Image (cartoon, rainbow, N blue to C red):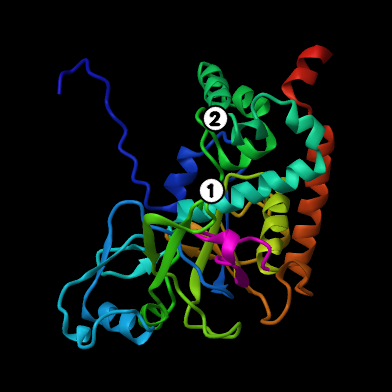
């Protein structure tokens, strides 16, 4: 190294102290809220893979015969595989799963639906918010304009309520949803069934010629069947209190089975319910932040983070109206803060007229 060259400071980010040095000067210590639970299908569910076609070997052919397919006798011995047009995404181990992006899209769509109901007129006239659902070019144009801004606070202040939570082209989101895997992959695979479909000719109202296709959704045996249970994990990072309130409203609807996921929703597919289990908090310092109601006196240090032990949610209770005082008080305050955020928010047109 040349004598005049500046020395590089080498900082290891594996300890809490080093992480705090890097975050020195931040307005508030970063916090992570993690909600874990189980998604249980009540009706057939399928989130289609968009990258490949599944092949079902002999077992698929035998199933066609068992369902009464008009095939010739003895066709069980046919070794030819059957292609499936609509099937689950699968990992390298052939385990089906629901992509986190698909679940995130369903939740975002429901958030927009809730906000359209609460403040439809103001959101309808705003250039950067819910019009993006049917006018994507308008959102891209506004995103490029905000991307020219160098100050994050300016970008954040000009973003709409939905964009502040989920992000857009000029700013990352605060919410993260992981891919959802079955709690018992073997049981889940046994619940997959092959279905035949045919497109309808809108003029003759009969079957369209050459438009036959098939799908392979998961079929639960009954509403109490746990063979289709899926591991759910939602994470909020660097958030405001009203973000929790908005997420709480959506998760409550998910608990009540009001949000359908994936393919075939118009024909009864995709109904699931959320069974929450735990709420966890991670923070970098002992300082009390937004989630002070859930912080304990002596949190455990894990991997550089102060890990707050899980707050268990009693089974059979509605998570957001649970008698768990800590969870209930937090959500109640978050929803009240959300009301204030909605009442104080103004579309960009109103802001420009007011200045």
Q: Residue at x 18, y 18 (%)?
A: 3
Q: Position of residue 105 (x, y in %)?
A: 54, 49
Mark 2, residues whose alpha carbon is within 10 Å: few (<14), some, or many (≥20)? few
Q: Which of these two is toward me, 242 or 178? A: 178
Q: Which residues are magenta?
A: 257-277
Q: Which of these two is toward me, 207 or 167? A: 207
Residue 267 is inside the magenta segment:
yes
Q: Position of residue 296 (x, y in %)?
A: 66, 66
Residue 157 occupies which quadrant of the picture?
top right
Residue 136: numbered disc: 2
Residue 180 is inside the magenta segment:
no
Q: Residue at x 52, y 61 (%)?
A: 264
Marks 1 & 2, CB-CB < 8 Å contact: no
Mark 1, residues whose alpha carbon is within 10 Å: few (<14), some, or many (≥20)? few
Which structural element holds mark 2?
A: helix
Q: Is residue 237 left or right of residue 96?
A: right
């Amino acid at each position: 190294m040349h004598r005049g060259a500046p020395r590089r400071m080498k900082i290891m980010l594996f300890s809490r102290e080093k992480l705090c040095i890097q975050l020195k000067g931040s307005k508030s210590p970063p916090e992570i809220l993690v909600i874990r639970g189980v998604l249980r299908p009540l009706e057939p569910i399928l989130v289609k893979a968009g990258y490949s076609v599944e092949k079902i070997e002999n077992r698929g052919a035998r199933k066609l015969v068992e369902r009464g397919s008009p095939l010739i006798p003895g066709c069980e011995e046919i070794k030819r595989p059957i292609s499936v047009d609509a099937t689950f995404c699968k990992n390298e181990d052939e385990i089906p799963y629901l992509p986190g992006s698909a679940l995130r899209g369903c939740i975002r769509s429901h958030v927009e639906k809730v906000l359209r109901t609460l403040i439809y007129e103001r959101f309808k006239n705003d250039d950067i918010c819910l019009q993006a659902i049917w006018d994507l070019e308008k959102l891209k144009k506004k995103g490029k304009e905000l991307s020219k801004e160098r100050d994050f606070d300016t970008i954040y202040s000009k973003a709409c309520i939905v964009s502040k939570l989920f992000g857009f082209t000029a700013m990352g989101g605060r919410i993260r949803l992981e891919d959802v895997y079955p709690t018992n992959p073997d049981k889940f695979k046994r619940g997959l069934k092959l279905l035949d479909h045919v497109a309808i000719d809108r003029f003759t109202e009969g079957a369209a010629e050459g438009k036959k296709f098939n799908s392979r959704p998961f079929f639960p045996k009954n509403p109490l069947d746990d063979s289709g249970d899926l591991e759910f994990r939602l994470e909020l990072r660097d958030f405001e209190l009203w973000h929790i309130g908005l997420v709480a409203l959506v998760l409550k609807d998910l608990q009540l089975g009001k949000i359908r996921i994936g393919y075939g929703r118009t024909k009864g597919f995709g109904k699931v319910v959320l069974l929450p289990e735990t709420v966890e908090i991670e923070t970098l310092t002992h300082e009390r932040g937004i989630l002070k109601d859930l912080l304990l006196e002596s949190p455990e240090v894990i991997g550089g983070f102060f890990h707050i032990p899980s707050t268990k949610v009693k089974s059979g209770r509605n998570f957001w109206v649970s008698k768990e005082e800590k969870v209930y008080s937090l959500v109640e305050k978050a929803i009240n803060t959300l009301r204030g955020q909605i009442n104080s928010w103004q579309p960009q047109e109103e802001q420009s007229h007011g200045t």
